[in-house]
Image: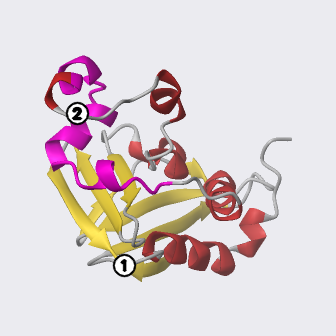
Amino acid sequence: MLVGNPSRFAVEINVQTTEHRPWIFGTFYFWINSIRFGDPEDTVALNGCINWAIGFLNVPPDLTNEKLYNFPLLTIWSIFIEENVDAIYQEIDYEISDYFMEESKFLMTHIGMSSFESSGDEFILIKNDKGLERLIYKSENTPMGEIILRRNEFEEVLEQLVINNVELGQIDYLR
């Protein structure tokens, strides 16, 4: 099942097995700029992915940061992925607290659980004051890139994923 527009941002899930109910296993992909991210060999608990999406929608993190949104692509990547904070402090006028680095609220990789780990997929989502969403991506096989999504486009895709897979989200995967 695919929700969203793969040429912009979409999520695809494919159920592979239901024999271990209540767990439902399958593949989980992000599509960004017509590029598929996620490991086709990795099977994830789709219940967990849906519940991450539900949590993101129910208690959305504050991803609005105008200054960070306007940083060059490589600077943002260096802050969040390479955690090269010391070098960056000297280049930009921006204070990054230890809590900010630990929180990692701008990183979206966790939504797909292990699906993105083996292929080195990373995603950063930052909003500006107008609500535009800057989605930055990279993997081992894909060069770093970005797309500007319209206001709440990322959330709308997650919402459609949840609506179309309500039965998966009803499983309490923490028990």
Between 7 and 153, the one lying in front of the other is 153
Relative to 60, 157 lies left or right: left
Q: Quadrant of residue 34?
A: bottom left
Name the residue beneath numbered marker 2.
78
From the viewer's perspective, is residue 80 above or below residue 12?
above
Q: Is label 1 in a helix, a strand or a loop? A: loop
Say few, some or many: other residues with alpha carbon within 10 Å of mark 2 (under 14 / 14 to 19 / 20 or more). some
Three-letter residue code for mark 2: Ser
User: Does 119 sit left or right of 63 as displayed?
Assistant: left
- Measured from the top left, where is residue 95 in percent x and y? 36, 30
Type of amino acid under label 1: Arg
Q: Residue at x 24, y 67 (%)?
A: 147
**Image quarter of residue 25:** bottom right
Question: Is residue 1 covered in magenta?
Answer: no
Residues tagged 1 and 2 counted as in contact (Cβ below 8 A): no
Residue 73 highlighted magenta (yes or no): yes
* Residue 99 versus residue 104 in the image, above or below: above
Q: Residue furthest front?
A: 93
| Towards the viewer: 162 or 127 | 127
Q: CA distance from mark 1 to mark 2?
A: 25 Å
Residue topped by disc 1 = 150
Dot 1, crowdedness within 10 Å: few (<14), some or many (≥20)? some
Region rendered in magenta: 63-89
Closer to us: 17 or 128? 128
Q: Is residue 81 in view?
A: no
Q: Image quadrant for the C terminus?
A: top right
Residue 96, image x, y percentages: 39, 29
